[in-house]
Image: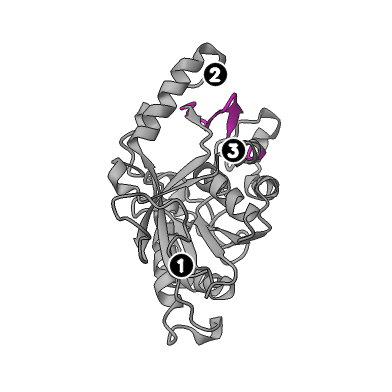
Amino acid sequence: MISDRRLLLVHAHPDDETITTGATMARYVAEGAQVTLLTCTLGEEGEILVPEVAQLAADQADQLGGYRIGELRAAMAELGVTDIRFLGGAGRYRDSGMIGTPANERPRAFWGADVDEAVGHAVAVVRDVRPHVVVTYDPDGGYGHPDHVQAHRVAMAAVEAAADAAYRPDLGPAWDVAKVYWCRLPRTAVRESDDALAAAGQRVPFLPSAAIEHAPFVVDDDEVTTAVDAGHLVDRKAAALRAHATQITVRDGFFALSNDLGQLVRGTEYFQLVRGERAGDPSAREDDLFAGLPR
């Protein structure tokens, strides 16, 4: 029987966790679950929205990664998450930038990392935390970013390897994760966001996000197996988004990255179950990542 609930989320860069799973993390912390965040890079290649620290950029002082550790810790404090880890240790793997850019070729770029080595680092975390549920990205990494794709590969391989007692016994006893989810967004949610943005008018100076409707992480509604409602904690998610100030602008219930595509700060987040048993009526969405697991 599960006496405590343990959730591990594997994300590529600081801020990814809050954008896609911030409300979910806040909900499970509030409910007493152990929530662990594993981040694969420091986001060194991110575009900087704060002029005062623009000199930290990769093509200048190249100090953004260290700065973003502070932003991540501040964001997690807003969500109540205290177990924050970096794959192989902070700075082991570097943000690879977008596909086809020179950043892909940097020696520490996560995209070019030895996958077996990276999986070993992830297995060490899985076996230490012993999560019942793991959350990560789909095979396209959400929107094709090479670090997101690599995070998916590493997370999925680590789940399998961690359950194999013959794999690296030096990393601790084998552990079989009960459920694995990929972050998703139903197409209707994108349309609802744009409708709300249009209704807000000029007071929210963001562009419609319709351009993301055909991104890989945006799927038909029937592909979403699980919707986690944490609407009562949406203010915590908004505060966590604000903590990632070099990357995100938040205004009047919406947020945007450097592309200025506005999205609602959602209190409900969506997932697709890809490993484990779906709870309840298969025609209905789960409302809990731990649904169906013994209590």
Please state which amino acid type lies under the numbered disc 3: Val
Q: Residue 262: where, in percent of width, then height?
A: 48, 27
Q: Main secondary structure of the magenta part?
A: loop
Residue ID for mark 3: 234
Which quadrant would residue 218 be assigned to in this image?
top left
Identify the magenta region.
243-261
* Mark closest to the chain's N terminus, 1 or 2: 2
Can residue 207 be spotted in the picture? no
The verdict on residue 260 being magenta is yes
Q: CA distance from mark 1 to mark 3?
A: 26 Å
Q: Nearer the viewer, residue 93 or 19?
A: 19
Can residue 264 be spotted in the picture? yes
Query: Residue at position x 69%, y 50% from top?
Result: 73
Residue ID for mark 1: 293
Query: Is 219 on the left or on the right of 6, as rendered?
Result: left
Q: Secondary structure at mark 3?
A: helix
Q: Nearer the viewer, residue 4 or 183?
A: 4
Q: CA distance from mark 1 to mark 2?
A: 42 Å
Residue ID for mark 2: 204
Query: Residue at position x 58%, y 48% from top?
Result: 14
Q: Mark 2 and mark 1 in contact (Cβ < 8 Å)?
A: no
Q: Residue 244: where, in percent of width, then height?
A: 63, 40
Q: Mark 3 and mark 2 in contact (Cβ < 8 Å)?
A: no
Please state which amino acid type lies under the numbered disc 1: Leu
Q: Residue 242: where, in percent of width, then height?
A: 64, 35
* Mark closest to the chain's N terminus, 2 or 3: 2
